[in-house]
């Protein structure tokens, strides 16, 4: 199989590529990435001379580039996205371009050439839930510009299936964590700041709840969806591990043997959803997927990875130190 992965220098995309190539010697991967914020060429530096991996710098909105590459591949997995919610509040335009226009560009080409496409989405399309969990058929209710663009992309994907019978599958996942995550996100930011004994900003009261899933488990689900997912279907992916932000930060501090005095409560961001939750029974029943990594084990693995990568651990740039990044100017 020759697979085109977009956004493969990012957090989830790079972990997906490494997992696929480590476990499947007969797979070739072409990785298209624009190398914008959240991408890091070092994430896949060990593949630089691999015979079954090729990197192409480019943007998924570039129709000629995407058509040239897609026609040479069997399927596309679209990880490419602007994904940092705080930045979408400050300026939504890059999210509209990448998450909607980029998805449309890929959709149009895979439909024309009859290729399979896996669209990577998010639990945020369903918005905040007071109780219960969202199913694949639940109503979209996005609360921020990022989530709205991902919901829009999903609607485009489904419209192409309904109109053109396109070979498309959508996966929605809860909050990922693990190696190679962009340091502005909660878990790596906490690790980096705690390592330097700097204050760790926690939004509001720290009681916002997310379902945390180790990135390798998410990658397993994406691969199963690629190989065996039903055309036109969507699959929710969750670890059944709902934890509030304060518990996450305290767990990291405990693993690193750091004081909770480092915690600093800061102003909450606008439109901060209180709780996300997905029901993932469908992917378990239909494709046989299950979570393999519990939260304690995953946090220990994640902390150790950052400790073993000092060039990232020592990143205390302005963006990492910024406690309210949605207020930052462009």
Image (cartoon, rainbow, N blue to C red):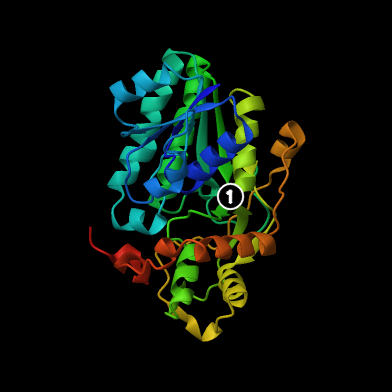
Residue 325 x, y percent position in the rendering: 34, 65
Say which quarter of the image contains residue 316.
Answer: bottom left
Q: Residue at x 40, y 19 (%)?
A: 109
Q: In front: 306, or 123?
A: 306
Residue 244 x, y percent position in the rendering: 60, 68
Say which quarter of the image contains residue 245.
Answer: bottom right
Q: Residue furthest top?
A: 113
Say which quarter of the image contains residue 61.
Answer: top left
Q: In front: 184, or 30?
A: 30
Mark 1 surroundings: few (<14), some (14-19) or many (≥20) residues within 10 A = many
| Quadrant showing the C terminus | bottom left
| Quadrant showing the N terminus | top right
Q: Residue at x 50, y 18 (%)?
A: 115
Q: On screen, 116 above or below 212?
A: above
Image position of 155 (left or right of 178): left
Q: On screen, 237 above or below 277?
A: above
Q: Residue at x 71, y 37 (%)?
A: 282
Disc 1, SS: helix
Q: Is residue 267 visible?
A: yes
Q: Residue furthest front?
A: 49
Residue 150 x, y percent position in the rendering: 45, 42
Residue bearing mark 1: 215
Image position of 308 (left or right of 57): right
Q: Is residue 187 visible?
A: no
Image position of 308 (left or right of 103): right
Q: In front: 296, or 87?
A: 296
Count of numbered marks: 1
Q: Residue at x 28, y 53 (%)?
A: 91
Residue 8 x, y percent position in the rendering: 44, 39
Q: On screen, 151 above or below 174?
A: above
């Amino acid at each position: 199989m020759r697979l085109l992965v977009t956004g493969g220098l990012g957090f989830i995309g790079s972990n997906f590529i490494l997992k696929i190539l480590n476990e499947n010697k007969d797979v070739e991967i072409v990785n298209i990435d624009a190398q914008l914020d959240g991408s890091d060429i070092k994430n896949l530096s060990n593949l630089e001379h691999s015979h079954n991996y090729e990197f192409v710098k480019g943007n998924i909105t570039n129709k000629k580039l995407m058509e040239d590459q897609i026609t040479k591949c069997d399927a596309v997995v679209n990880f490419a996205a602007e994904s940092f919610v705080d930045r979408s509040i400050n300026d939504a335009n890059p999210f509209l371009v990448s998450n909607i226009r980029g998805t449309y560009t890929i959709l149009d080409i895979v439909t024309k050439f009859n290729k399979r496409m896996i669209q990577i989405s998010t639990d945020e399309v369903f918005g905040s839930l007071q109780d219960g969990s969202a199913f694949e058929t639940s109503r979209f209710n996005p609360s921020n510009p990022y989530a709205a663009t991902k919901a829009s992309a999903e609607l485009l994907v489904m419209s192409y299936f309904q109109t053109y019978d396109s070979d498309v599958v959508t996966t929605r996942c809860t909050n990922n964590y693990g190696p190679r995550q962009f340091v502005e996100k909660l878990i790596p930011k906490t690790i980096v700041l705690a390592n330097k004994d700097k204050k760790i900003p926690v939004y509001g009261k720290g009681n916002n709840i997310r379902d945390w899933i180790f990135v390798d488990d998410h990658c397993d689900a994406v691969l199963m969806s690629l190989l065996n997912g039903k055309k036109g279907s969507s699959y929710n992916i969750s670890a059944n591990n709902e934890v509030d932000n304060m518990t996450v930060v305290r767990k990291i501090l405990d693993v690193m043997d750091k004081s909770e005095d480092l915690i600093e409560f800061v102003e909450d961001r606008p439109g901060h959803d209180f709780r996300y939750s997905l029901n993932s029974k469908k992917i378990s029943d239909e494709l046989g997927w299950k979570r393999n990594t519990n939260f304690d084990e995953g946090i220990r693995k994640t902390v150790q990875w950052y400790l073993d990568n000092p060039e990232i651990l020592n990143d205390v740039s302005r963006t990492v130190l910024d406690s309210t990044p949605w207020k930052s100017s462009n």
